[in-house]
Amino acid sequence: MARHGATASGGVNRQALSAEEFAAWRELIEWGRTLGMTPYTDAIGNLFLRLQCGDPDAPAVLTGSHLDSQPSGGRFDGVFGVLAGLEAVQSIVDAGVPLARPIEVVAWMNEEGSRFAPGMMGSSAFTGAATPESYFEIRDSAGVSVADGLTQLRAAFPDLERRALRRPYAAYLEAHIEQGPVLEGAGRTIGIVTGIQGKQTFRVTVRGEEAHAGTTLRRERKDALLAAIDIIGALSSEARDEADLVKFTVGRLVVEPNAPSVVPGRAIFSVDIRHPDSAVLARLGDAVPQLCRAHAGPCAVEVVRLTAAPSLAFPDDVTHAIAEAAERLGLSAMRLPSAAGHDARFLNDVCPTGMIFVPCKDGISHNEAESATPGDLAAGARVLAEVIAQHAR
Ligand SMILES: [Zn+2]
């Protein structure tokens, strides 16, 4: 899979609804077909592979993750969960495990949110947390909309069947690299994910006035970049906590017209705030619009909240099933919350959901250097297979 969108430094650039992701789809569909799985899609561009077995009308067990990556992403984020799901299906079929219900592997559309923001479009539209239509007009930096991308997807896969959103599932299980240093530091192989840290994201647009860098007096200027810097400084101070639990990030800043001799007329930036405690997170998020206005100086500011996701806990019976599977297989395990967001967040609203983490080298992710050992990945896939089989039997 890492060949699709491979970068010179050993990572991948395989963004949502790109030609690279379509190539990955093609390969995954082919692999699924060799296992006897039927591919299909839906109105928001998720890819499903269905293994028909047991009662065809019984809700299936769903597993998977995403195939899209950050622009300079690694080879494991997302794709591990999809391929581990496929490996699990292969093992279950090979072992002749009697199944009471179908199993499906999914690759959710646009988990990363790097080409089109926000992320997790596929899983949120699938579960009904958002409508597909609410995403269609969102555009990437080249002006291509989600609707355009979906049209290209359908053109690339004209024969793929389309099914309804919000179909019921018996369970959703997602394997993923940890994307943090906890498992590696503790010397454990399997992470039993207890829940997902919430996050709030915003898009802030500061509007000033373009002016001549040589002739315009300071008191007459409406410098959008200087205002943005003041605002970011204020938000960053507000987010500073003694315990070092708040995660505050401004990962994107666009300055217009971005010319050396022009006072910036517009600055647009992203804000991403995370905290494991929902109440603290809500307080920090609620403070953003007012802090932006208070530090905008002579400029106008517009704040759009893109995500307000509280922290959540996965159900005990799923985490217990994962813990028992790891124990049966003789793998060292520990419970931990996920510091990163995942599609499992939305599935947790509609069916019993759980996640399995494996260590990644030095906790590095969203980086071309992202790495995980074959042994750890195989261990995660084995636990996943056990838990899927248990839920599908
Ligand atoms: Zn991911």
Image (cartoon, grey):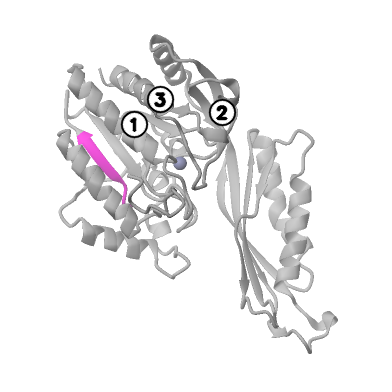
Determine the residue positioned at 28% across, 63% down: 151
Q: CA distance from mark 2 to mark 3?
A: 23 Å
Choose top left, top right, bottom left or bottom right for residue 65: top left
Image quadrant where one finds the N terminus:
top left
Of the image marks 1 and 2, the number of the one nearer the N terminus: 1
Badge 1: few (under 14), some or many (20 or more) residues near its Cα, within 10 Å? many
Instruction: Report which residue position mark 1 lands on.
Output: 84
Residue drawn at x 47%, y 39% is 342
As drawn, is 253 to the left or to the right of 296? left
- In the image, what residue type sits under mark 3? Gly
Question: Looking at numbered disc 2 in the image, what kind of residue is underneath it?
Answer: Pro
> Sequence-wise, which precedes: disc 2 or disc 3?
2
Structural distance between the alpha carbons of marks 1 and 3: 13 Å
Label 3: element kind: helix
Q: Nearer the viewer, mark 1 or mark 2?
A: 1
Magenta highlight on residue 179: no
Image quadrant for the C terminus? top left
In-image side of 308 versus 166 (left or right): right
Residue 248 place in picture, x, y as percent: 67, 47
Tell which tag, 2 or 3, sits nearer the viewer.
3
Specify the quadrant of the image occupied by residue 291.
bottom right
- The magenta stretch is 43-50
The residue labelled by disc 2 is: 337
**Horizontal arrangement in the rendering, residue 279 relative to residue 151 (left or right):** right
SS category of the residue bearing label 1? helix
Q: Quadrant of ligand 1?
A: top left
Asked whether residue 48 is drawn in magenta, I would say yes
On the image, numbered disc 3 is attached to which residue? 375
Mark sitting on residue 194: none
Separation of disc 1 and disc 2 at Cα?
Answer: 21 Å
Residue sitting nearer the eye, 91 or 375: 375
Name the residue nearer the viewer: 43 or 371.
371
